[in-house]
Image (spheres, helix red, strand yellow):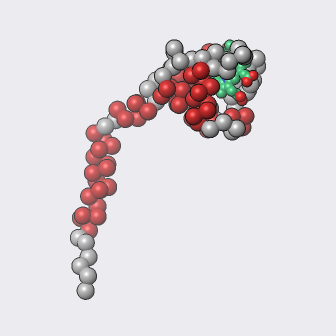
Amino acid sequence: MTMRRPIRFQLLPDLALALVAAAAPVSAAEIAPNAGKLANLVRQDCGSCHGLTLRGGLGKPLTSENLKIWNREQLVGIILDGVPGTPMPPWRALLSEGDAQWIADRLQQGNLP
Ligand code: HEC
């Protein structure tokens, strides 16, 4: 007959995870360093060309529908390096790679806060 693992050992990993999550509230902030600030930047700065509702203007719509053709890496590249030969400027001086990833994810998911 095989021995069953005592139930307390099966519960431990969950408990450990919960403790780590509780002890490190910073991790969410690291993923989205300045969510409010970035969302404002996207609406105002990006919106000045892409439309205040991001549905297009001088620049193309930044809707999740329109951005499906790009993968995350490509979008991050467009945001950081711009689109040469068009008015789309590079944002590398103002945005970190993490900022650009955050923006790319929100735009593609259509859930800019
Ligand atoms: C000075 C005007 C201007 C500003 C400001 C601007 N863009 Fe653009 N953007 C454009 C133009 C014009 C294009 C279209 C380039 C082309 O013809 O492919 C574009 C293209 C893009 C594309 C590719 C869209 C597609 O479907 O090919 C993305 C993504 C994008 N911009 C994101 C941003 C983000 C994010 C910001 C703010 C951080 C921003 N843009 C700010 C003018 C601007």
Taking the spot 29% from the left edge, 44% from the top edge, the residue there is: 20
Quick one: quadrant of the C terminus? top right
Ligand 1 position by quadrant? top right
Taking the spot 68% from the left edge, 18% from the top edge, the residue there is: 84
Taking the spot 34% from the left edge, 32% from the top edge, the residue there is: 26
Which residue occupies the extreme bottom position in the image? 1
Q: Position of residue 4 (x, y in %)?
A: 26, 76
Task: Residue 54: tell me if it is visible.
Answer: yes
Quick one: quadrant of the N terminus? bottom left
Task: Give above or below for 59 relative to 2.
Answer: above
Task: Residue 36: tell me if it is visible.
Answer: no
Taking the spot 25% from the left edge, 72% from the top edge, the residue there is: 5
Q: Position of residue 42 (x, y in %)?
A: 60, 21
Q: Where on the picture, by quarter, is residue 105?
A: top right
**Number of numbered discs on residues:** 0
In this rendering, would 78 be left or right of 66? left
Q: Where on the picture, by quarter, is residue 13?
A: bottom left
Q: Position of residue 109 (x, y in %)?
A: 61, 38
